Amino acid sequence: MNNLPVRMARWSALRPWRAISGWFLFVALCLGAGAGIGGNPAKSEDFRIGEAGRAEAMATEGGLQQRPVEHVLITGKPGTTGKTATRGRLVLDRTAAAAAARDIGDRMRKLPEVASVAAPVRSSDGTALRIAVTLKGPELDGKKHVEPLRAQTAAAQAAHPGLLIEETGSPSISKGVEKQRGSDLSRTELIALPVTLLTLLFVFRSAAMATVPILLALSSIAAAVGLSMLASHVFPDAGVGTNVILLIGMAVGVDYTLFYLKREREERARSGGRLSTQAVVELAAATSGRAVVVSGLAVAVSSATLYLADDVIFSSIATGAILVCLVAVASSLTVLPALIAKLGARAERRSARKAGRGTPVRAPKSGTGRITAALLRPASRRPAATLCVTVLGLLALASPLLGLNLTDMGRETHSRQIPAMQTYDRLNEAFPELKSMHQVVVRAEPGRAAEVAGALRELGRRAASDPALAGTAELRVSQDRRVSLLELPVPHYVSSDAAQQSLKRVRTDYVPATVGTLTGVESGVTGDVARYADYPAHQKGKLPLVIGSLLLVTFAMTVWAFRSVVLGLIGMALNLLSAGASLGLLVLVFQGSWAEGLLGFTSTGSIGSRVPLLLFVILFGLSMDYQVFVISRIREAALSGVPTRKAVLDGIRSSAGVVTSAAFVMVTIFAAFVFLHIMEMKQMGFALAVAVLLDAVVIRAMLLPALMLLLGEASWWPSRGVRRARAAAPAAQSPVSVG
């Protein structure tokens, strides 16, 4: 047992207080360093992708980039004016509205956060007035500076009680989404933590033992959050890193500790008190400790494939997942053996006192549960039939993937519980031209500015007759006359077919026929609709590369862990089936409308463009947890000379309890995300919960044993360790069946 997990466990068990204080000092240093240096949030340029990103870079070069804009909406207030016949909206008192608009303009211009205030614009039906207020700084920084504007809007409302004065815009909406996300995550923690604690109390029958996994998971999360702030200076944080650390950290932190603790209890019960606490800890480290290290490395390496997506959001997610997994592994190697040693010594003293009083000491419950026995029975009796039925069932669940529709989740998918979104709907109803836009950007030599402007005006004239475009096209030119930008209003939400078709016409018809006839210029189309279209296209293009790398990593990690090419191929196949089935169910549920009332969402008829890629990576990593743990138990038996059939069945039986408990904890944590308001988080939580459930119940308890029973000794090819162990074992060993 001369390996790293054992050596570290031995040191920690012999010096428990040093290990415990050292761990919490490490956590404090990580948090302190992170808070002291601070994070590096992603900037607008970090999000640029495709043609939209290229055109946006050109616009920024000319100082024509999108700015954070807030719209103050003035409408009639119920009970103060009569109703108009147009859509039931109230008639607006022109004199009162003009006075309110002047007041709002004066208030906003005094704010240091405001760059400019546009002239008031009246809606076509005369029921609303809007004032566009542009903030200083980059587009993404708007939410940091929007509160003073909202305070002035509230003050204007108080000063003009006869009108309804509201504010919305990207900064207000981003601020509202951020606040709602924080509230949602707090609620999920309130659900997940008690359920996790109750599960662990049921498993260990001890409050002290049940508290250890949660304590280590939370401390690992805290350390990873601090480290992620430091890492953000290399991989900018897109604002999702902490969410991923919470999601993954709670799951793997509890899992790894659970694997270790369960094995320690088994070894303690098996020794019957003949081994010291330190010896028991070393035995657990040599078995489950090694499995935890392999599992953690597998999740970290799998997560690293997200860097290949060439996207700041996925890089941020990969960084968070890698850090929290490695920190969780470190906690299981260092502080966990120390805590086990202290708890074990306490348990030994309690047992000695009970023995002195003549009180019988209850041994930990062992054996196969009824559910596990029922799931395992078909595989043990009819492995071929079980294999065929489960594979066909999983393929059937994966079949909805054929109709997968990937889109970026636009602003219109946000919850209407956010006040800014309610105002956003009223603003777009009164001013449909604000729903989205196209921006045609052209870069050329300054001397050709007039020629470029003529081509863009011609493009605007052609677009004016397009039914999917509306409003007046606006032409802007940079101060150095190198960059020109034509903005075309689109009276449709970015997700609508009309908006997407209009983008195709602009890119394939209008631009080639006008700007495209100019030689020596560079052009591109960006804007809300282009961003929405280009991001999913980028993800689809990267999906084969990431999945191919993921399969290769899974294969390599499995072969490295078990010295078996066959098990590596099995691991790839099972992970594909598990991920495919869960994604198929995701499509079935969220692209349709039948589950809207059940899960509390409004279907967009699509799946978020980030979701499949992210799920494949996370699911492959988490599946390796169970795969490594279960196969480690099987291989352990095989290396002791047990025939493969008995090793498979005994390994599944002995690991069933801890896998079931760990899966229940994971499913609880992930399922809590289904009740969030953010659509992509709902979809991720659902798919992850389903995947873990399928993995623990179908893959590990039915499909894996059926495959290994059919393959027999070939499962270990080309490993020589199992063959040598078999040769050294007694020739006659009777097979065991489950009945």
Image (tube, helix red, strand yellow):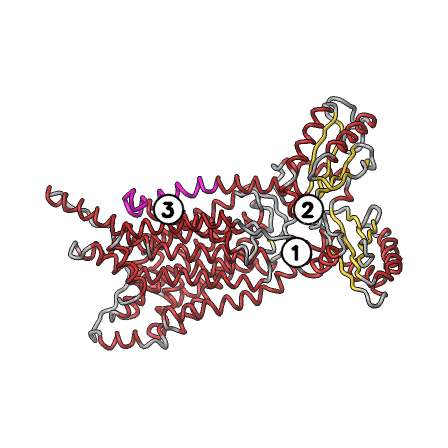
> Disc 3 and disc 1: Cα gap in Å?
39 Å
* Residue at point 76%, 55% (across, down): 62
Secondary structure at numbered mark 3: helix
Secondary structure at numbered mark 1: helix
Kindly indicate whether the residue at mark 2 contacts the one at mark 1 (C-beta within 8 angstroms): no
Give the residue type at disc 2: Gly
For the question of whether residue 650 can be seen, the reply is: no
Report x, y in % for residue 513. Answer: 85, 63
> Disc 2 and disc 3: Cα gap in Å?
42 Å
The N terminus, quarter of image = bottom left
Q: What residue sits right under mark 2 in the picture?
A: 137
In the current view of this chain or complex, which residue is farthest to the top? 80
Q: Which residues are magenta?
A: 187-210
Report x, y in % for residue 210. Answer: 32, 45
> Disc 1 and disc 2: Cα gap in Å?
13 Å
The answer to whether residue 191 is magenta is yes
- Label ID, residue 45: 1
Q: Considering only vertical position in the picture, is 730 above or below 664?
A: below
Give the residue type at disc 1: Glu
Task: Name the mark nearer the viewer: 3 or 1.
Answer: 1
Task: Specify which label sits upstream in the sequence, 2 or 3.
Answer: 2
Q: What residue sits right under mark 3 in the picture?
A: 214
For the question of whether residue 271 can be seen, the reply is: yes
